Amino acid sequence: MTVPSNTLIRGGHVLTMDPELGDLPVGDVLVTDGRIAAVGTEIVADAEVIDASGAIVLPGLIDGHRHVWQSLLRGVASDWSLPEYLREARSMYCACFDPDDAYLANYLGGLESINAGITTVVDHSHLQRTPEITDALVRGLLDSRVGGVFCYGLQNVPGMTDPGAVRDLLTRLPDDWHDANAQTVRDKYFADPRQRLRFGIALPESAPYLPADVLDALVARATALNPSLITGHWNDRCPDVFPSHPQISLTHANHLSDDDLTALAEAGIGLCTTPDIECGMGTGPLLARRFASRGGAASLGTDITSYTRADILAQARLLLQVERSADALPPTVTWRARDALDLATRSAATSLGLASEVGTLTTGTRGDVVVVRPDPLGATPVGDPAATLLFYTSPAEVETVVVEGELVKRDGALVGVDIADVRQLAEEAAERIRARYDRLPRAALEGVWSGLFG
Ligand SMILES: [Zn+2]
């Protein structure tokens, strides 16, 4: 496919999300050789022109935490509690994926992201059961053309049906082969440290519960793999071993205290809140706003597309409303749509160590640009464009997506993707996975996770 070196997105309401630049009610964005070359008005350039008049132009959205492999399990988790999720998804469904399924899941998850204007995804990839699966997971993301960080799950993944073996596997530190396996894909696919999709490490669920010296050793082990990001699920214990390591983003962390949040913010550690999952599974207060108010850089995450679709604007909206619901009949609101949108763009990029690359439409950053055309009946005339994005749009209104200067969605359709073909492959894979799942010794595996952590 020919990739034009210049693309001019013309005449839209530009939300740069850069506090210095602000909005341009009628503005242009020029992308040259994959980077933002200019943001302004009436830019003249020899470029392929995308007409954005009447539409909203914003930086590529960021999903700070997702297990992309679960895109083939849509809907299975939507009525699950956390214990049910851990048992079903993390000790049963994970045993049912072969490399072809893994590839397709991540390919589909990447396409789903682009379709929704999400150009950067942190894939907390905890399906590293075999080297073949690892390789397939990375290829799936790369082929989808989405950017972000593939975070190799440095943890054991059950692939067997004996409950004792499963329990043992989950509770011991990651087996030795993981390091070489992670290194292999890092060297094979992530040679350029500035590339669109980068290499990271995801810590195991056990991490917050480990004694400090063991956690320190585990983080040192992760750091030795030279990741651009280390991420992990967290809870109520503030880590004190992280500040001297690479960029860190912790997810959930619902029970950290205000002092903990201040300490994390001062250490430059990011925090990711996943509103749908945290509300739905009752994991505790959503912390993104509290963290941001202490100067921390927070992001929002979908977490599991086995529960809800990848739509980060919907997550921003849910967080906004949860925050507002905490005040009884306030005379004015203290948190605005734009503040929540910031967590899906600028703040998220900072939390992931990617502020110089994505999150704002600023000259020199990566050419990730999204054009959203509000529905003429339900969303126009447009008032505040940030509010329109959160309250009046869905992925269906994402008209154009540019990733690193490449037009990957145009006129509402993914470029170079046969949707019917992908759908058929996904349905066939989901059927295979379900058949394997139905053959698992359910009664024996139930209870494997109970009491393991926390
Ligand atoms: Zn998660």
Image: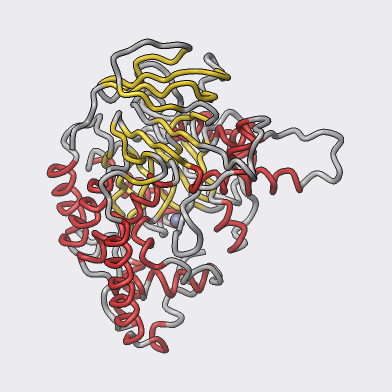
The image quadrant that residue 186 belongs to is: top left
Quarter the N terminus occupies = top left
Residue at the spot 24% in from the left edge and 23% down from the top edge: 5
Of all residues, the one furthest to the front in this rendering is: 377
**Residue 349 as seen in the image, left or right of residue 178:** right
Q: Is residue 309 left or right of residue 188?
A: right
Residue 326: image x %, image y %? 76, 47
How is the rendered protein coloured? secondary structure
Residue 294: give x, y in percent of width and height. 62, 31
Please name whichever residue, 265 or 221, is drawn nearer the observer in this view of the structure: 265
Residue at image coords 45%, 18%: 28
Q: Residue at x 53, y 51 (%)?
A: 274
- Tell how many labels: 0
Q: Which residue is at a point 34% across and 46% down the rendered structure image?
A: 414
Q: Please determine whether, in this image, residue 77 is positioned above or below residue 213.
A: below
Residue 427 visible in the picture: yes
Image position, residue 189 (x, y; %): 17, 43
Quadrant where ligand 1 appears: bottom left
Q: Is residue 270 above or below residue 10?
A: below
Q: Is residue 220 something that shows in the picture?
A: no
Vertical position of residue 244 compared to residue 47: above or below: below
x and y, in percent, of residue 3 in the image: 22, 31
